[in-house]
Image (tube, helix red, strand yellow):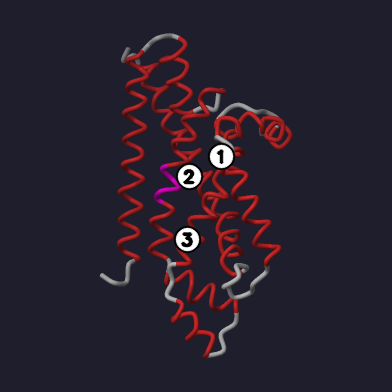
Amino acid sequence: MWSSEVINMLIRGAGETIYMTLGSTLLGYLFGLPMGILLVISDKDGLQPNGQLYKALDLVSNVVRSVPFLILLILLIPVTRFLLGQSYGSTATIVPLVVAAVPFIARMVESSLKEVDSGVVEAALSMGAGTFSIITRVLLVEARTSIAVGATIVTGTILGYSAMAGIVGGGGLGDIAVRYGYYRYESDIMLVTVVLLVFLVQVFQTVGMKVASRLDKRK
């Protein structure tokens, strides 16, 4: 089992899994963070209430999150092929991962921002702060610890999704587990991929919680 070919394959699979997870998380926050902020400020109790905008974002978020990732992955194959020219491999898998991650991240951000003490926001309003200033200097600052914890959860979830994409040739450790563990009955290789996935989740969890702890001003 432990030939150089297998070891190189596992190292390459771990690298692809990290690439898919971190790439999808970063791109997910690029779109999910603004979406979460819009959900908060357009809410009926938000800084700029807008019922239609909130309902539209709420609907999109709920619909996408309702679709199981494996089905979403298959549904988006034509879109992925249109954007990247192929629908398999680690880079192609980032497309459905980002689509799945954006509404999830938006909800996490929304939850974090709503934890901010309304008194702090009211104090900023009384001093004449505008909406943009309150978002960037009050809400995001006060909620930074919660947002960091949420990012840790999101990263672990996306890593799990990336492994699931192995069923359709998504690359990474999940792909290795499916090809060798399911199709070839080489359970020893599949067991190693599971151990590596657990290890990666532990690493992401530890790093994320350390970052959150450093951002916690109460300590």
Identify residue for label 2. Answer: 22
Question: Which corner quadrant holds the N terminus?
Answer: top left
* Mark 3 residue crowding within 10 angstroms, few (<14) / some (14–19) / many (20+): some
Q: Earlier in the sequence, mark 1 or mark 3?
A: 1
Q: Residue furthest top?
A: 184
Residue occupying image coordinates x 62% and y 45%: 63
**Residue 170, percent from left and from top:** 54, 27
Residue interval drawn in magenta: 152-156
Amino acid type, mark 2: Leu
Mark 1 vs mark 2: in front: 1
In percent of width and height, residue 165 lies at 53, 29
Q: Which amino acid lies under the numbered mark 1 shown in the image of this protein?
A: Leu
Task: For label 1, count other residues whose C-alpha is less than 10 Å away and answer few (under 14), some (14-19) or many (20+).
Answer: many
Find out whether the residues at labels 1 and 2 contact each other: C-beta distance under 8 Å: no
Circle 2 sits in a helix, a strand or a loop, which is it?
A: helix
Write down the residue under mark 1: 97
Which mark is nearer the camera, 1 or 3? 3
The structure residue drawn at horizontal position 47% and vertical position 11%, both measured from the top left corner, is: 183
Outermost residue toward the right?
82
Q: Mark 2 or mark 1, which is nearer the start of the sequence?
A: 2
Residue 39 appears left or right of 190: right
Image quarter of residue 148? bottom left
- On the question of residue 176 being in view, the answer is yes
Across and down, in percent, residue 124 comes to 50, 84
Q: Could you say which disc has been placed on residue 179 in the image?
A: none
Vertical side of 92 occupied by 139: above or below: below
